[in-house]
Image: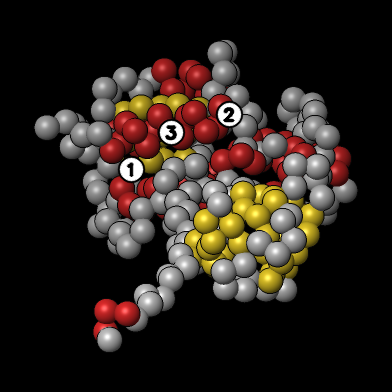
């Protein structure tokens, strides 16, 4: 009769997660799950002894109940946040903005290339163009020609901006509130790259009055400044490769030109 049919006992399946403690039903070996080898689960007992057991149905006891261990299903890995060379969280699927009126000026093409290498992604998202100058001797007149305003800000990065320098006197003539001039203490932007990245213990000390780049090349045995610059730029992949004063100055400039007056 239908009422006399014996119901089949259902053996639950349990995922063999790490550290799950089970007992092999046949041998009585009790241990925690520590891994898998060739389709078998690896158990380790409290004495550190390990044994492998096939994942056969109803082969284990969990809290005294018969269970079937199964290998855990693969979990989707959380997506890793991509970080730009400047250390910012990258924003995916965002096109570069149309260039805004605000600008960042740097002294030369080497400065511009280094800024692009580290902050290029951030600046494209903000729509800020970096323009190289041919030195800053005529900075005040160039700023006047730019006609800064609350909606058209200007940031300027200056090399060797230290007290008493020629650069500090030039910068002092720029007083427009819509212009921010920052700088670093290094004679040239080359020197803002950490010397160990270029394979040097320290940047050579070049006597005043002597062309700095040519002096560096001679000291390290490189024939042309262009060759040395390629070596320097190739050594830079993120903000971690340059000195803190340059990082701080650029971050201030980017903040200044991207926060405009209402």
Residue 225 visible in this rendered orientation of the protein: no
Colour scheme employed for the rendering of this structure? secondary structure
Residue 133 located left or right of residue 20? left
| Left or right of residue 21, residue 208 in this image | right
Residue at 25 percent of width and 49 percent of height = 100
In primary-sequence order, the first of circles 3 and 1 is: 1
Q: Quadrant of the C terminus?
A: top left
When the figure is inspected, residue 21 is found, relative to residue 186, above or below; the finding is below
Say which of 169 and 152 sits in front: 152
On the question of residue 83 being in view, the answer is yes
Determine which residue is flagged by label 1. 103
Residue 31 in the image: state x and y as whole percent.
Answer: 69, 50
Sequence-wise first label, 3 or 2: 2
The local secondary structure at tag 3 comes to helix
Does the residue at mark 3 contact the one at mark 2 (Cβ under 8 Å)?
no
Judge by depth and name the residue closer to the eye, 258 or 18.
18
* Image position, residue 261 (x, y; %): 16, 31
Please name whichever residue, 249 or 17, is drawn nearer the observer in this view of the structure: 17
Q: CA distance from mark 3 to mark 2?
A: 11 Å
Residue displayed at 36% across by 58% down:
92
Residue 256 lies in quadrant: top left
Q: Which mark is residue 244?
A: 2
Instruction: Write the residue at 50% across / 61% down.
Output: 14
Q: Which mark is residue 251?
A: 3
Q: Quadrant of residue 99?
A: bottom left
Please say if the residues under marks 3 and 1 sit with CB atoms less than 8 Å apart: no
Front: mark 3 or 1: 3
Q: Residues within 10 Å of mark 2 (few under 14, many from 20)?
A: some
What crowding class fits label 3: few (fewer than 14 Cα within 10 Å), some (14-19), or many (20 or more)?
A: few
């Amino acid at each position: 009769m239908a009422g006399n049919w014996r119901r089949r006992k259902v053996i639950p399946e349990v995922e063999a997660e790490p550290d799950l403690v089970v007992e092999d039903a046949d041998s009585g070996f009790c241990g925690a799950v520590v891994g898998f080898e060739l389709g078998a689960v690896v158990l380790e007992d409290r004495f550190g002894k390990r044994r492998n057991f096939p994942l056969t149905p109803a082969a284990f006891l969990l809290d005294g109940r018969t269970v079937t261990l199964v290998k855990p299903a693969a979990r989707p890995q959380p997506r890793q946040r991509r970080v730009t060379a400047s250390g910012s969280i990258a924003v995916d699927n965002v096109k570069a903005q149309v260039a805004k009126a605000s600008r960042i000026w740097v002294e030369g093409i080497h400065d511009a290339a280094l800024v692009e290498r580290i902050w290029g992604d951030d600046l494209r998202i903000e729509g800020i163009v970096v323009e190289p100058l041919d030195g800053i001797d005529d900075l005040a007149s160039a700023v006047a020609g730019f006609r800064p305003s609350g909606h058209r800000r200007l940031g300027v990065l200056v090399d060797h901006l230290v007290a008493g320098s020629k650069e500090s006197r030039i910068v002092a003539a720029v007083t427009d509130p819509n212009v921010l001039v920052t700088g670093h203490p290094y004679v040239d932007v080359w020197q803002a790259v950490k010397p160990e990245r270029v394979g040097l213990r320290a940047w050579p000390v070049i006597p005043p009055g002597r062309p700095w780049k040519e002096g560096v090349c001679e000291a390290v045995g490189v024939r042309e400044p262009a060759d040395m610059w390629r070596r320097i730029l190739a050594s830079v992949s993120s903000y971690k490769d340059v000195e803190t004063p340059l990082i701080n100055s650029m971050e201030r400039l980017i903040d200044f030109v991207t926060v405009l007056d209402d």
